[in-house]
Image (cartoon, rainbow, N blue to C red):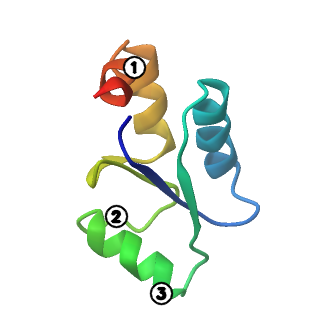
Amino acid sequence: MPNIEIYTQPFCSYCSLAVRLLRDKGIAFTEIDAPYGSAARREAIERSGGRTTVPQIFIDDAAIGGCDDLVALERGGKLDSLLAA
């Protein structure tokens, strides 16, 4: 099972949706609280190549993007193969 990390912030509907999608799939992941201005948020921006929004999702240290990207992978039938690696 790959290492999955998701940077989120409180009261973010996109963060909640991404977390729910992963939970519904039964995928283990690490959620990192990254509110605006925090060290964790700066880390997410650096790791993602400059993306400033949350959530930021990483699978085995590869940035896959945010909620819309995660949903697009799921709808395109590509998420399961990434998660099975």
Q: Residue furthest top?
A: 77
Dot label at residue 80: 1
The kind of residue tagged 3 is Ala
Q: Secondary structure at mark 1?
A: helix
Q: From mark 2 to mark 3, how far is it between C-alphas?
A: 15 Å
Q: Secondary structure at mark 2?
A: loop
Locate residue 64, reporting x and y percent: 32, 44
Q: Residue at x 31, y 28 (%)?
A: 82
Locate residue 23, reporting x and y percent: 65, 34
Q: Quadrant of the C terminus?
A: top left
Mark 3 = which residue? 39
Judge from the rendering whether residue 75 lies leftward or rightward of residue 47; answer left or right: right
Q: Residue at x 76, y 61 (%)?
A: 11
Q: 79 above or below 77? A: below
Mark 2 = which residue? 51
Q: 22 above or below 73? A: below
Of marks 1 and 3, which one's residue comes earlier in the chain?
3
